Image (cartoon, grey):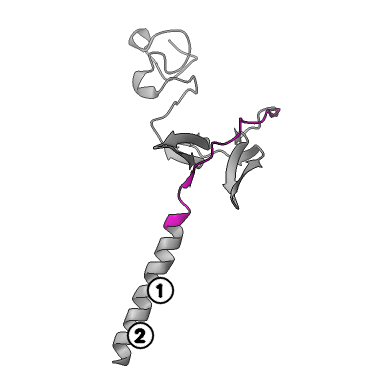
Amino acid sequence: MMKKILLGTMVAATLSVGSVSVATADVFVRVAPPPPRTEVVPEPRRGYVWVPGYWDYRAGRHFWVQGTWVRERHGYRYAEPRWHERDGRWVLERGHWSRGGGDRDHDGIPNRVDRDRDNDGVPNRYDSNPNNPRRN
């Protein structure tokens, strides 16, 4: 009997810990965030990515989080935090790093449709070295 009670307690504790981590994933609110504030973007820093400020939702109200530098992760692309409307509610997608794909040359065009990957002005089909901007 004691073993069953102990086992039931352990299972309940495990489930409650798992539900806490899931609850922090998305933020759903009925009130749209205010317009973004204007921030002065500092000069670029080598090895870092600028994350602009955004509205977070804490303790029942929108709260401004100032922009900051985060250390760059090679092979990853940073997606900024953003709000979007879904079924009459507002959802905050937290900032996160995503692997590969992305935009290798940072020209705003995804790699899968980029016609000039190295941004040297020569289309990839005519470029003998499409990933090297110093050679055609």
> Which quadrant would residue 117 be assigned to in this image?
top left
Residue pointed to by mark 1: 13
Residue 99, image x, y percentages: 41, 38
Circle 2: is it few (<14), some (14-19), or many (20+) Cα within 10 Å? Answer: few
> Closer to the camera, 51 or 45?
51
Q: Mark 2 highlights which residue?
A: 6
**Measured along the vertical axis of the image, is residue 77 above or below residue 118?**
below
Residue type, numbered disc 1: Ala
Looking at the rendered image, the quarter that the C terminus falls into is top left
The quarter holding residue 54 reads top right
Point 64% across, 38% down: residue:
69
- Label 1, label 2: how far apart the Cα atoms are: 11 Å
Circle 2: residue type: Leu
In the image, is 76 to the left or to the right of 124? Answer: right
| Quarter the N terminus occupies | bottom left
Mark 1 or 2, nearer chain start: 2
In the current view of this chain or complex, which residue is farthest to the bottom?
1
**Could you tell whether 100 is left or right of 79 in the image?**
left
Residue 21 x/y as whole percent: 45, 59
Return the x and y of residue 112 as percentages of the image width and height.
Answer: 34, 23
Dominant secondary-structure state across the stretch colored magenta:
loop
Q: In the image, which residues are magenta?
A: 22-40
